[in-house]
Structures are given as C-alpha cells and as structure tokens.
Image (cartoon, rainbow, N blue to C red):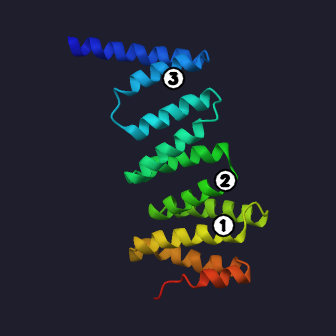
Amino acid sequence: MERQQSQKEKSLAWFKLADLIARGEREKALNVFRLLAHSLQDRAYVLQLEGDILWYLDDKNSAEKYKQAAFLYQREKRWVDAIAVYEHLLTQTPDSYEILASLLIFYAMIDWQDKFHDRYHHLVRLFNDHAIDEFQMEKAVKDVVDVVAEAEQEQKSAWFWQWFNEMLSDMPEVLATRLGGLKRES
C-alpha cells in the first residue's frame, strides 16, 4: 500500500513537471525536476532529460547537458543512446564539426554503414564549403581509423577499409598523401 502511494505521488510530480514546462515556468520546473531526478538511477538519462527540458524552454544550456549525457553514454558504451543524443544535437547545429566527427566514430563502431556514409558526406560538404579546414578533416578521418583499427574485426571492418581507399581518391592530393599513411597493411 505504501509503495502504491509513493508511485502515485511520483506520477503526480511528473505530471506537475510537465505542466510547469508547458507553461514555461523555467525555475519551478527545474526545481521539481531536480527533486524527481533523485529517484532516477541513470545519471546520463537524467542529464538527457534536463537537456530536453532546457531545450523545450529555449535555454542555450541544453546543448551542454546533452553533451554531458552523451559523454556518459559513451563512457558506458551505450553507443545507440550516445548517437541519439548527438543526432538531436546535430539538428540544432547542423554544421558542427565536433558532432559530425563523433557520429562518424559511433557509426563505424556499431557498423552502421549507411549512416556513416551520410555523416561523412555531410562532413565533406562542410570541407568543400570551407566551413572546416583540411586539418579538421584529417583529424576526423584519423580518429575513425584509430577506433576501427583498435576494434578490428575482419568481417566487420572490410567495408570501412574499402570506403577508406575510395575516400582517399576523392581527397586533395596533399591531404590524401598524409592520410594514406594510415592504410592498414593487408
């Protein structure tokens, strides 16, 4: 009976929180959220929820909360959760080099080729539009190569090395030469 009452109180508190958010009462909503957050064990999820609240309230601090959540998800090797947060961040800042570079790593790690290629082509567009320089492009590729080489599983990464070789042929010659040294020995 006591547990049932506690659950009803929590449900009512979450409903109150939603109402405060809908009315735009930022401080009250955050105070209620902080109290409710103590009942949640998953720190990354708490940060993500706080980011969601701040985002809904048009608070610029939402991105920082999302990044903190993604960092914890990554540390816990919860790749899909980290990807979801970074994809949400990308909708807010579609030309963010840091977010795209992180997504490339995650998609290579979970072997999601289509999304990897989509995000890589997005990064190439930024490079071609001079929104990022060749050193940023080189770093993004090197970071992905390092992660793939570290987690090498022959059948899992075969597509990656094929992409890598094709990517080199599309790069400016100076950059392709520097990146060419990363090729794995067959």
Residue named by callout 3: 30
Q: Secondary structure at mark 2?
A: loop
In this view, the residue farthest toward the right is 129
Please report whichever mark, 3 or 2, sits nearer to the chain's N-terminal start.
Answer: 3
Q: Is residue 51 left or right of residue 168?
A: left
In space, the residues marked 3 and 1 are separated at their CA atoms by: 37 Å
Residue 62: image x %, image y %? 58, 36
> Do the CB atoms of the residues marked 3 and 1 lie less than 8 Å apart?
no
Which three-letter amino acid code belongs to the residue tagged 3? Leu
Give the amino acid type for the residue marked by disc 1 in the picture. Answer: Gln
Q: Which of the two labelled residues, at mark 3 and mark 1, occupies the earlier sequence position? A: 3
In front here: 64 or 171?
64
Residue at figure coordinates x 67%, y 62% from the top left:
123
Numbered mark located on residue 58 in the image: none
Left or right position of 119 against 152:
right
Task: Report, in whole angstroms, how far the alpha carbon at label 3 lies from the one at label 2.
Answer: 28 Å
Give the answer, above or below, for where 84 lies relative to 172.
Answer: above
Instruction: Give the residue number, with chain letter if any, for mark 2.
Output: 96
**In this rendering, would 124 be left or right of 111?**
right
Q: Residue 114: give x, y in percent of width and height.
A: 56, 61
Please give left or right for residue 106 compared with residue 178 in the image: left
**Is label 3 in a helix, a strand or a loop?**
helix
Point out the residue furthest to the bottom here.
186
For label 1, the residue is 136
